[in-house]
Amino acid sequence: MLTDIFARRYGETVLWPAYTATEARLLVQAFGLVEEVIPFREGDGRQIIYGARERWTQIHDTLSRELGVHELSPRSNGWGNRFDMDLVCKIFVTENPPRSENADQAIKERLSFVELAFRAREQELAAFTADLPKKIAAAQRSEAVRLAAVLKAGGGATVDCRTIAAGVTAELDEQNSVFRACVDELNERFRQAGTRLNYHNGVIQVGADPLVEREIERPFWRLVADPRWVNVDTDMKEALDRRDSGGRDPAFYSAKALESTIKIISELKGWTTGRERGAHNFIEHLAENGFIEPWESDAMKHFFTKVRNPFGHGPGSADMVVLTGQQTQWAIETCMSWTKTLIERR
């Protein structure tokens, strides 16, 4: 199965002309965060956490397959002594690559490991969230069985379902909080290393200037991490990938993300009739129900008319519409900003 990795998405874009002490430091710091996100050993450093070897091996094997190698670094020392998977991965990520290796590609491959590890943990937390009701029910059943044994032995107790539910939910909240803190630190490490990279919702991509990143991009990615906004997340990532690789029509994909946002909100509010013919009708639903002001409706309609629609239809014999780099960035930031404010109002 093909897996999307940072090294492939940015394969044609040179991000690092050389491997310096700054890049070496970044990779050590990033790997340390991976060890926090998916711990391999207990606090004493000796006992391997249950299931950790399998989780790390899966990440290792996935990246190995995408890079076309059998192993990221040697799994044994040649005398029959095998290394644990955390050491195999650590050597790959943190040891300086050979001088003959392309520095830019080497750094991208190593950050791909970081990306896959963070993505794996994010997917685990999403699955945990989706299964939360089942986990609460399982915890309550387990407690009921335990208390039944206590009662049989002559004790007295009752199952406090609310307390159990609160405990399971608090555990998930704590795990999410730890993960978000690691994401924030990873992005800060990227900034300190002089890169414009930003991790969000399973991918590492080039971000905007620091102010836009802080005020628009980070809140945007956190909001669309909710599964209901998956199409918004997917199209905006595609917009950024096309922008960074010089691909065609990145603004079109950012506009698709905004259009999906408008449609989802209309559906959630019960305003969708099924007779809509385009984005303008959905925008009108938002305006007619007081969700947005008339001037906001006009502004969004104008954006779709002048930016989205020309890319969504063949130009025929007319000149092909082409945006400059600055116009493309403006379109992406505009769609992010609109999406952010619309979701926050919901």
Image (spheres, rainbow, N blue to C red):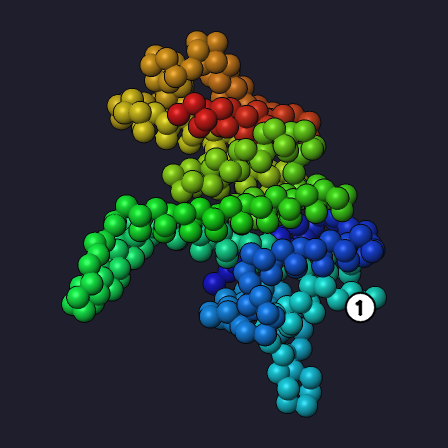
In the rendered image, the vertical position of residue 259 relative to residue 286, given as above or below: below
Of residues 31 and 107, which is closer to you in this image? 31
Q: Is residue 323 above or below residue 166?
A: above
Q: Residue at x 39, y 17 (%)?
A: 291
**Residue 192, image x, y percentages:** 75, 44
Residue at point 29%, 22% (across, down): 271
Q: Which quadrant of the rendered structure holds the C terminus?
A: top left
Residue 256 visible here? yes
Q: In the image, what residue occupies the spot 51% across and 14% down?
A: 299
- Name the residue carrying label 1: 98
What is the quadrant of residue 198 in the picture?
Answer: top right
Left or right for 53, reference 8:
left
- Does residue 265 appear left or right of residue 141 in this picture? right
Horizontal and vertical percent position of residue 5: 58, 55
Residue 269 falls in image quadrant: top left
Looking at the rendered structure, the kind of residue marked 1 is Pro
Q: From the viewer's perspective, is residue 78 above or below residue 289?
A: below
